[in-house]
Image: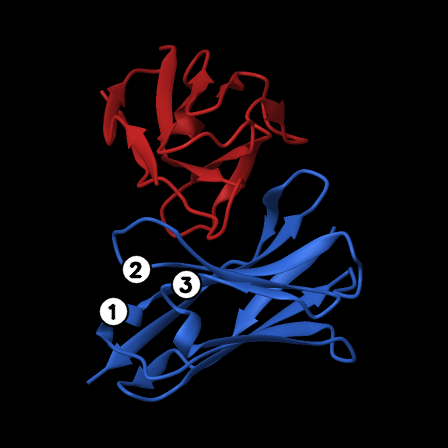
Chain colours: A red, B blue
Amino acid sequence: QMTQSPSTLSASVGDRVTITCRASQSISSWLAWYQQKPGEAPRLLIYKASSLESGVPSRFSGSGSGTEFTLTISSLQPDDFATYYCQQYNAFPRTFGQGTKVEIK
Amino acid sequence: QVQLQESGPGLVKAAQTLSLTCTVSRGSISSGDYFWSWIRQPPGKALEWIGYIHSSGKTYYNPSLESRLTISADTSKNHFSLRLSIVTAADTAVYYCARDDTWVHALNIWGPGTVVTVSS
């Protein structure tokens, strides 16, 4: 089970934003983060908890290991308003968190 | 850049079988570096991992769907497919195919998704 918090986050352009994902048991660093905009497929942002996918802006970063992980956006941009999902790769089935929607404040 | 595209009926009657195909272009599903995956998203809800198939033919399914699910691949056509039997309204969702990369251990290429509605 993967649990994200908060479910919704209201923020302004330029804010530092942090989203948390907790695993019900240790998953080492086998965690990915995705961004999804309405009507679009998800996009990979971070893999292995902290590795930035090619082409993803450096304002995105991931950290954590074991059961607690965070996705941080250092300075929120207009293009970043979206829903973010974590996914664990430690065990089958590959479960996703319930999502965190980042809204404009 | 590898591209994926889902295709199949957008409307399926309850109790029947949902069949979708994902065509891969600019890349080969025969590569051993990838697992070819299906994910779905019910309206307004979170993503749900369905399962995947490796070029070796090995499959892994979500236990919640395993009794109704078959994922297969046709290397001659460079596509892979999903069949979900005895569908209900709960199977209404956007269905995505995606590439699970064994080097990054994540879904790094996705199809645009296809809407499937189960009608009663």
In 3D space, how far apart are the residues under numbered discs 1 and 2 (Cα atoms)?
8 Å
Q: Residue at x 31, y 80 (%)?
A: B87
Label ID, residue B63: 3
Q: Residue at x 46, y 40 (%)?
A: A87
Give the letter of the chain under mark 2.
B
**Taking A51 as reference, is B99 above or below it?**
below
SS class, disc 3: loop
Picture coordinates of residue A21, whole percent (x, y): 37, 28
| Left or right relative to A28: residue A76 | left
Q: Earlier in the sequence, mark 3 or mark 1?
A: 3
Q: Earlier in the sequence, mark 3 or mark 2?
A: 2
Categorize mark 3 by other alpha carbons within 10 Å: few (<14), some (14-19), many (20+).
Answer: few
- Residue carrying label 1: B90
What residue type is disc 1 on?
Ala
SS class, disc 2: loop
What residue type is disc 2 on?
Pro
In the image, which is nearer the foreground, mark 1 or mark 2? 1
Label ID, residue B42: 2
Rendered image quadrant of residue B71: bottom right
Picture coordinates of residue B67, whole percent (x, y): 40, 76
1 and 2 marks in contact (CB < 8 Å): yes
What residue type is disc 3 on?
Pro
